[in-house]
Amino acid sequence: MVIIRKFKIVDTALVAKIVSSTFKRYNKQEGTKEAAGRFINFYNPEKNIEKIKLAFSKSDIFFVAVDNKKIIGMIRGKKDRVVNLFVNGKYHKRGIGSKLMEKFEKSCIKKGSKNIKLRASIYAVSFYEKAGYKKTTGIRNFMGLKIYPMKKNV
Ligand SMILES: CC(C)(COP(=O)(O)OP(=O)(O)OC[C@H]1O[C@@H](n2cnc3c(N)ncnc32)[C@H](O)[C@@H]1OP(=O)(O)O)[C@@H](O)C(=O)NCCC(=O)NCCS
C-alpha cells in the first residue's frame, strides 16, 4: 500500500535520485540540452548533495510517497507554489501523483493559502488540468526549460 508521509532529511539522496532520473526519462527534451543537463546534475545526489540539502531545506511543505518502505514519489513547495512533483515512472497512472497533490493542497489551505501556482512541465499539463489547474499564460521559458505557468484557486 502506498502511503504519503512528511519528508525527512535522511530521505534526501533517494528523493533527489527520483527527481533527476524521472526528469531524465520524461522531461529532458522539454528544454535546451544545457538546461536539461543543469537540472539533472543539480539533483544528482552523488555530485551535489549539499546544495540539494540546502534547496530542500527551503521547502515549507514536503511529502514523499512510500510503497513498502521504498520512496517512489515526492512533492515540495511553499503554501502558494508547487516547486517539484515527481513520481517514479514504474508507478505512473496509479493515483500517486494525485495523492501527493491532495496532501500538498490540504497543507496549503491549512497555512491560509487561497491559490496555488506552479510551472508545469509539458509532460504534466494534462495531469494538472485534471487536478483543476488552469494555464495562466502561454508557454514560457524558465531557466531554459519550456513550462506553462498554471494556477488553481483552493
Ligand atoms: C506528472 C506526474 C507526477 C503524474 O503522476 P501519476 O502518479 O502518474 O498521476 P496520477 O496517476 O495521479 O494521475 C491522475 C490523472 O492524471 C492522468 N495523467 C497522469 N499523467 C498524465 C500524463 N502524462 N498525460 C495525460 N494524463 C495524465 C491520469 O491518467 C489520471 O487520470 P484519471 O483521474 O482520469 O484516471 C508523473 O507523470 C511524473 O512524475 N511525470 C514526470 C515529472 C513531471 O513532469 N513532473 C511535473 C513537473 S512540473
Image (spheres, rainbow, N blue to C red):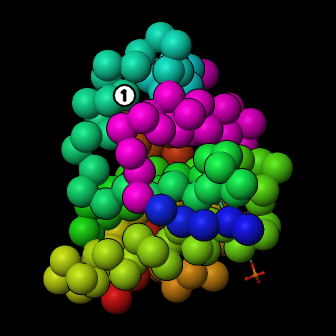
Q: Is residue 60 left or right of residue 24?
A: left
Most frequent secondary structure within the magenta stretch: helix
| Residue 151 magenta-highlighted | no
- The three-letter code of the residue at mark 1 reads Ile
Q: Foreground residue, 38 or 93?
A: 93
Q: Residue at (27%, 83%) from the top-left corner?
A: 109
Q: Foreground residue, 143 or 101?
A: 101
Q: Is residue 97 left or right of residue 119?
A: right
Residue range highlighted in magenta: 6-34
Q: Is 25 drawn above or below residue 92 in the view shown?
A: above
Q: Position of residue 114 (x, y in %)?
A: 23, 85
Q: Position of residue 113 (x, y in %)?
A: 21, 80
Q: Position of residue 65 (x, y in %)?
A: 58, 58
Q: Is residue 72 left or right of residue 82?
A: right
Farthest residue toward the top?
47
The mark tally for this picture is 1
Q: Is residue 91 left or right of residue 46?
A: right
Answer yes or no: disc 1 within 8 Å of ligand 1.
no
Quadrant of the rendering where the N terminus is positioned: bottom right
Q: Is 144 drawn above or below residue 136 in the view shown?
A: above
Q: Which residue is mark 1?
A: 52
Q: Quadrant of ligand 1?
A: bottom right
Snapshot quadrant of residue 19: top right
Q: Helix, strand, or loop for circle 1? A: helix
Q: Residue at (43%, 44%) from the top-left corner?
A: 141
Q: Residue at (29%, 35%) from the top-left corner?
A: 55
Q: Is 2 drawn above or below residue 40 in the view shown?
A: below
Quadrant of the rendering where the C terminus is positioned: bottom left
The crowd level at tag 1 (other Cα within 10 Å; few <14, some 14-19, many 20+) is some
Q: Position of residue 101 (x, y in %)?
A: 50, 72
